[in-house]
Amino acid sequence: MKTLLTIIKSSFEDIKRNKIRTFLTSLGILIGVLSVVLLMAFGFGLKAYIEKEFESLGKNLVMVLPGKGFQQGGQGLIGGVEFDEKDVLKLKRIKGVENLAPVFTKSIKIEANGKSEPSSLLASNGDLFNVVSLEIDKGKIFTNAQVEKKEKKVIIGATIAEKLFGSSDMALGKTVRIQNQRFMVSGVLKKKGGGALGSDSNTQSITPYKSVFSLNPNKKFFAIYIKTKNSESIEGLKSEIKKILLRRYKEDDFSVTEQAELLGTINSIFSILNSVLIAIGSISLLVGGIGIMNIMYATVTERIKEIGIRRAIGATKKDILLQFLSQATILSLFGGLIGLFIAFAIVLLIQPIFPAVINPLAVIIALGVSSAIGIFFGVFPANKAANLSPIEAIRYE
């Protein structure tokens, strides 16, 4: 044990004597670890954000989506049909349906006081507020009766309220223009990160769907969200929904799914994504490892005479092997620690604008792989140093 500590101490002294070389040698590992940790942080953060968004939709939720949704390899909501009011009326009659909210979305601009703000419009009915977890900070929600009357009401996000009127309180009761139509602000959403159905609630606007048919002339819906009375009735409800929709559409035109299925698919997609990201970052680590091996070979060549003298006065092959192996490992671990520190700093800086999260697994992988690379790429030059003939090494010029 004492001999090992002496060897490690000697390795540290050798590294300190060549600070610039130490930094440049560790740079490849530093960049590799930084890449792996950041890519994993982005992957885990995005996964956690999406999971949180789905959880915010509420419990006992069934989603009717166009195409095959996320059910086949995570292809996304591409193709398929859009739904109409006939579908809404038929699905409402199904036993076990507690609330049903058809949804139409569109990117718009909201104008007031000579200012204009971009917004994600979400048009639906009064059931939306029972289906999706939406928190109103000021004012009140609109009802199904107001939807039928086509009342020009709008609930806006906190950021829009602040930018157009100065505050949420000041926005209430004021008039805004959406596509040259006048709407009264009846409520302001509570300020938070993330919004309903994948948008930012701070820049979201919600209106009765019958009040914005001019923006939706085909009177079609992107999706239909249905809340069941209890979780036990979900499978039966899904089966009944499919039966009704198959009378109008082909099987590939729509999908009926629930939160658990979507989250399972998302987890599978992100597991693959994280594996790909780790593989990409590992290329940098591999390059860094090769750099360490080259430098260690050069170090062995520079110190051949010193190795010969040490062998002549009693140092064993094992002592020489451990010294160069520990030096390579320390160089690699040094780069890994610095890369990890920089990754933490970057994540802290970007967290307010992007949901990056450093998972403990990323830290373990970073430090474990750094050490392993130092050992793997250091063993070849270390073995060369250990097998040098003492007599030939002393004669080396």
Image (cartoon, rainbow, N blue to C red):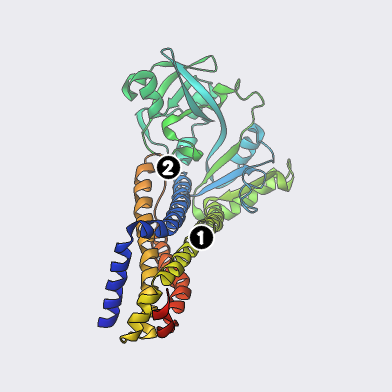
Q: Quadrant of the C terminus?
A: bottom left
Say if 323 sits above or below 169 in the image: below
Observer-nearest of 287 and 222? 287
Mark 1, Cα crowd under 10 Å, few <14 / some 14-19 / many 20+, is some
| Label 2 or label 1, whichever comes before in sequence order | 1
Point out which mark residue 46 bears. Answer: none
Q: Cβ–Cβ below 8 Å for labels 2 and 1?
A: no
Dividing the picture into quadrants, the one containing residue 314 is: bottom left
- Say which element carries label 1: helix
Point out which mark residue 354 bears. Answer: 2
Dividing the picture into quadrants, the one containing residue 163 is: top left
Q: Is 218 on the left-hand or right-hand side of 44?
A: right
Q: Is 209 on the left-hand or right-hand side of 35?
A: right
Q: Amino acid at mark 1?
A: Val
Mark 2, Cα crowd under 10 Å, few <14 / some 14-19 / many 20+, is some
Instruction: Calculate the distance from the C-alpha at mark 2 to the C-alpha at mark 1.
Output: 29 Å
